[in-house]
Image (spheres, helix red, strand yellow):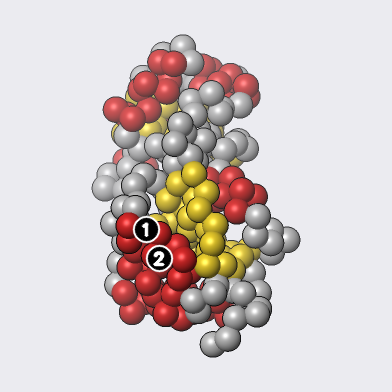
Amino acid sequence: MSTGAFYLIPTPIGNRDDITLRALEVLRGVDAIACEDTRHSSPLLQHHGVQKPLLSLHEHNEIRRIPELLERVRAGESIAVITDAGMPGISDPGYRLMQRCIEESIPCEVLPGPSAILNALIGSGFPCHAFSFGGFLSVKKGKRAQTLQAALDSEQTAIFFESPHRLISTLEILATLQPQARVCVARELTKKFETFHRDTAAALHAHFQIHAPKGEIVLLVHSNPAATP
């Protein structure tokens, strides 16, 4: 492996074996691995026989840690960057590092791999020729309502990350805005208890009021053309 470069590597979103051969080759060849949470990443790396020095790189230390990592790469080291699950930079650390690499002409290679966004989109059965990703919905109910209304007004499938603690509130908003809107709640993707709940906003709101939502959730919304405002 060439020296003096960063490698942004997607990691499995659930099933530990959902990692590419190329990703494993790079992880085994770098000098160090920067992890969002070393405690979370260690079992994955051990599962695949990867033994490298680990560094922490998360939202609370990213600004302080990046200059140190840049210096190490300038000195000829190769460093892989992984997050707890999925692609670094998508609602995870990695964006700031990529920006600095671009600004300072430091090599940074992005590897392809698992994505909860695409898994949820295809599994939902909603239109996928055009879609939007809005990251995590706001904790503020008013702002959430504005974002969801905009999603319903668009002709695209809208994808969001949502906390199980706020899901019922979010479904209530959708049920108020457009009861017959098409909604999919994708839970625990690629894990043992993976589920796809596909129904109207009103029906899913009623369902999760009885069955408390748990786990990691991807929420998909698509306006129902036949629905009345």
Rendered residue at 73%/61% (across/down): 129
Q: How many marks?
A: 2
Image height of 190 relative to 224, above or below: above
Rendered residue at 31%/53% (across/down): 212
Q: x, y (%) of residue 180?
A: 54, 74
Point out the residue furthest to the right here: 129
Image height of 67 relative to 154, above or below: above
Q: Secondary structure at mark 2?
A: helix
Position of 180 with respect to 92 (left or right) is right
Residue named by callout 1: 208
Position of 31 with respect to 141 (left or right) is right
Q: x, y (%) of residue 131?
A: 63, 63
Position of 127 with respect to 79 (left or right) is right
Q: Secondary structure at mark 1?
A: helix
Rendered residue at 61%/65% (across/down): 157
Rendered residue at 46%/66% (across/down): 203
Q: Quadrant of the image for the C terminus? A: bottom right
Image height of 130 relative to 96, above or below: below
Q: Are marks 2 and 1 in contact (CB under 8 Å)?
A: yes
Image height of 188 relative to 171, above or below: above
Q: x, y (%) of residue 173?
A: 39, 75
Residue type beneath disc 1? Phe
Q: Quadrant of the image for the N terminus? A: top right
Residue named by callout 2: 205
Q: Can the viewer see residue 69? A: no
